[in-house]
Amino acid sequence: MDDPAIQDVLGVVLKPTGNEATTFTGATEIFNNQFSEPDIFIIDRQLQNSDGLDVCRFLKNREQFACTPVILFSAGGKLHEMAKKAGADDFIEKPFTIKSLLQMIEKYVGK
């Protein structure tokens, strides 16, 4: 995620739900498999060193993550169409409410 405020918010709002957020500002850790396997990926379209759509494609093309839900988010328009083409399970446009984000996570993770 390119927005530190959203990174902080994710950590704070997920903790009471029993979920934990691990955040990265770029895609290097993902491309180098330097992370633990999550229940869900929430990926910003705009990252420091990559496009979130490319990260989504990379993950969905790996057998180990093909069934792991991916939610993309962005402030840009036409996200729905681009997210689906990249293999994302869902998308959310900025600005979004904490409630809508939590509902979307609940939809896919059920915690």
Image (spheres, rainbow, N blue to C red):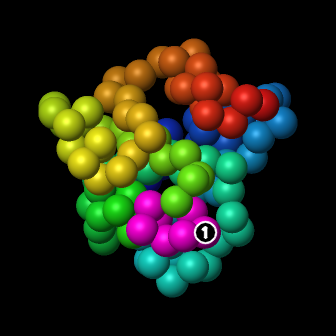
**Residue occupying the point 51% across, 83% down:** 32
Q: Camera-side residue: 81 or 7? A: 81
User: Image check: 11 left or right of 43?
Assistant: right
According to the picture, the residue beneath numbered tag 1 turns out to be 64
**Residue occupying the point 68% across, 50% down:** 39
**Residue occupying the point 41% across, 22% down:** 96
Disc 1 is placed on an element classified as: helix
Query: Is residue 92 highlighted in magenta?
Result: no
- Does residue 101 appear in this view? yes
Q: Considering only vertical position in the picture, is 34 above or below 101? A: below
Magenta region: 59-65
Q: Which amino acid lies under the numbered mark 1 shown in the image of this protein?
A: Gln
The C terminus - image quarter? top right
**Residue occupying the point 31% across, 71% down:** 49
Q: Position of residue 36 (x, y in %)?
A: 70, 68
- Does residue 5 appear in this view? no
